[in-house]
Amino acid sequence: MFRYLFPYGDVNKGSRVVLYGAGGVGYNYYYQMRASGFCKAVLWVDRDYEALQTKRFPVENPIRIMDMDYDVIVVAIRSREVADSIREYLVGLGVPCGKIFWKEPVLLDETPYSYTNNDNDIEDKPDESIKRIAPVELVSSDRMDIVVRYLFAKDIVLGLDSVRHQNLYSRFILTVNGADEPFYVDAPDGMSDYDRKTGLDTFVNDFRILIESMRHEGFLKDDCIPLNRNAELLNGSHRLAAALALEEEIWVKCLPEERVQDYWTIDRFERSGFPTADRVELMAGFSELYDSCGMMLLFGERELWRFIINRVLQGIKEVGHIGLDFRHDFIAFESLLRETYYEDDVCDELIRSRLLEGPRVCVVVFSDENGNNNDIIEAVRGRAEEVMTVMGMSRHDIYIPDRSRQRHLMDVWLSHNNIKVAGMMLRTASSNKLDNGIECLKGRLKESGISFDCVCLTDEAVMEILGLREAGNIGVLVSSEYREKIILPDGFCVEDGYNGVPYKCRSLHFVYHDMNVLNPDLVVQHKHDRLKDCFVSETDAVGLINQRRDKDDIRLLQLLYDYVGCFDRGNALRERFDSEIERQHEKNRFRLSDIS
């Protein structure tokens, strides 16, 4: 939906346009040029181009105008004074006055497909079908496509360059419509916001523009999302996902429609060829958005899983299930079981028996979306006990954590990092000092009434937990509301780095002794940025030591990824990895010359 109308009557059709300005007006003009094909945007510029480029906007330095072949420069600015200063700047660059166009942007009136700027205009004509709600009210396990969009939107909001989530989004768009969305000539109210889009770049860039526009202006009542008579989405999936990522309330309008958008369940993603890693991401994203859900683990033959799931979840909504096969990843399997049964005396015996029987696990997520149970966790636990009794199964064939452990184990088993990077696999290489320090930190948090989810350990802890070197003073990312309240034990300090990295974003962490630990990928990214941006004088001994440590850490983590990528070599790999760890600890420092 456009707030400012592109000056179609003043720009010749088919013109090569340089667009100057990437504010609210610029977003609208750029989007309309891309969507309508009326003219071609050969360049989009703004003086704040560097900040916009960090958000992946296709905005360039205005000086680039001198290199372009164009017909007109359209100045997308509301203020005449600012537009005049831009005109002077362009003339100073040598741009002919006749090629510079500006006039006061036209604010669209209230028409069936065009909307006013001010919510008060609508308030003068109350419409009881329009209301404001929290976006999470529209989250459903039948619409996991919303989660795809949400995961990518969250990365954009946080300023993270996540190839994984953009790739998932792109593959989904290709699956749905081949990245070619038709133009709806007779679109009903609220369904004309995306017009025609062609090509993945257009989908990705337009989604970024939508998110930035909503970040600056909020979710406008004009942009209300249409729902059918059953309060299901008719359109607005991208708007909903953007609002979820920005934690913005939304406006919705209920229409007397029967139809709905396509259902995209976890099963449909599987049938459409999306691999297990994608479905793990989607189930984790859903559990992050929808609090009233739980998880159970099933061990054994695949043939039994569907029967047991149906028996245990009678009347309870199954979000989805995934089968994980650890036959080529014994270390990660053992680590995940130890984290699951960390207080169980029979854990070693259980691990041995599972390795012999075949390390396969089915992870099932369920929710209270059907509204049949006040306490779905206890209901599922009770039914599981009945099934195990009837079938002669042990309590380690089906595992359903109690409510206090549900969130922790969902983070463990629905974690891209725990499975792919095997972040917990080398816990035996960490020192008692680190483990004792973490236990002391947990005690301090409990005393202060601070949730474990409000803190995250950073790079020093990462390096020791992965067995790469002994940790120094351990940085802790802390929620802003607790930074003044928290009292850290000796050896810990509040981390001031990692700007923009959230402490509670579960998909960025792995779990160790109930604590969130930063994703090693982000550690590498942060250390690269620090090396690139920080100049160290030859007389700064401490700075040189820290710089050398960052370089060593990056190489060690890259070496770790190389080993993790070869897990199909089984025990031979584990022996090689263990000998490498032993050698590192003997020398107490790993040198680049050792592997060059």
Image (cartoon, rainbow, N blue to C red):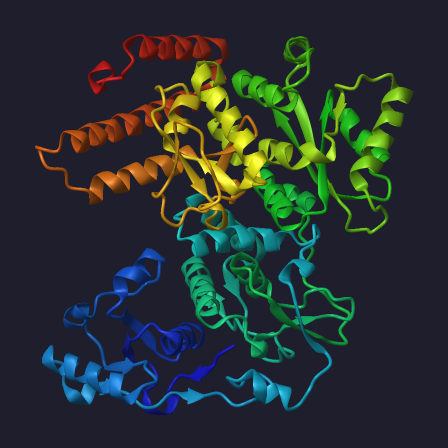
Residue 430 visible: no
Residue located 48% across and 14% down the image: 428
- Can residue 418 be seen here? The reply is yes
Front residue (pair 72, 382):
382
Position in image of residue 48 (x %, y %): 27, 67
The answer to which image quadrant residue 238 occupies is bottom right
Rendered location of residue 28, percent (x, y): 42, 76
Q: Quadrant of the C terminus?
A: top left
Q: Residue at x 44, y 15 (%)?
A: 429
Residue 46 appears left or right of 221: left
Could you say where residue 563 lies in the image, as x and y percent from the top left?
40, 20
Q: From what the image shows, is residue 177 above or below residue 537?
A: below
Residue extending furthest right?
390
| Closest to the observer, 194 or 111 | 111
Residue at x 51% of width, y 45% of height: 505
Q: How many marks?
A: 0
**Residue closest to the far left:** 539
Residue shown at 32%/23% (left/top)? Answer: 556
Give residue 112's quadrant in the image.
bottom right
Residue 25 sits above or below residue 487 on the image: below
Between 423 and 433, the residue placed more toward the observer is 433
Position of 123 compared to 42: left or right? Answer: right
